[in-house]
Amino acid sequence: MMMDILLMAAVASATAAEPIGDPGTWITSADYPSSEVQTGSAGATETVLLIDEKGEVKDCRVRLSSGSATLDATGCALLKVRGKFRPARDGTGARVATYKEQRIVWRRSPDADFRLPGVPSVVSVAVDVDVDGVIQGCTLLEGPRASGPASDPCVPYPQGRKARPATDADGKPIAYRLIQTMSMKFEPRP
């Protein structure tokens, strides 16, 4: 009985992680991925953030997709960089890791217009994966340099994210490099 009362008191005095600043400013219309302008993708990405004992976002998982993998990946990448929290504390006041839900609403600015590029656009990235299937890094091989996280072609490949492990012909795990090349050509319709 006494243990139950102490446990309830400890739980009651615990504090949740609280955002530092306005989370509504962490992602703005300027972060809307240029690749989604043509499709006009919009929606809400519901995420679950892992916040460590220092208040830093260590992981972001999509709980409910916006319907666009690009919007979802961009949102998580931006939250991991820009999201800052006062750490959660347990009943004794010690800092603890915790999870927190964060919702991102994606809307394309109504005054944004779409201009056809004059030349085809090609982007190529190299993604290095270790023997355990963990992404070690992503490098832009070809294409324009990113002007920010929303236009960075490496956003879907954050360091530390689990990828598919690979094996050699004998079934032994191996490190590998994935080279992804994307090209786009826009033409006016007749």
Image (tube, rainbow, N blue to C red):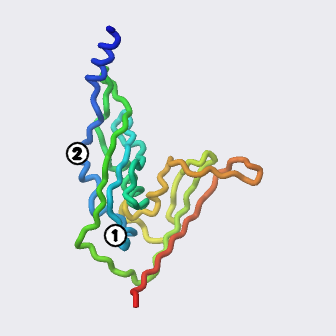
Residue 63 vs residue 166: left or right?
left
Residue ID for mark 2: 21
Given the image, on which type of amino acid does mark 1 rest? Gly
Disc number placed over residue 77 in the picture, else none: none
- Give the farthest residue toward the bottom: 190
- Badge 2 marks a residue whose secondary structure is loop
Q: Nearer the viewer, residue 68 or 15?
A: 68
Given the image, on which type of amino acid does mark 2 rest? Gly
Residue 124 vs residue 131: left or right?
left
Residue 107 image position (x, y, % from top left): 28, 63
Who's the residue at 26% across and 73% down the image?
112
Number of residues whose C-alpha sits closer than 10 Å to that of mark 1, classed few (under 14), some (14–19) or many (20 or more):
few
The C terminus sits in image quarter: bottom left
Residue ID for mark 1: 40
- Badge 1 marks a residue whose secondary structure is loop
First in residue order: circle 1 vs circle 2: 2
Who's the residue at 44% across and 82% down the image?
119
Q: Nearer the viewer, residue 139 or 111?
A: 111
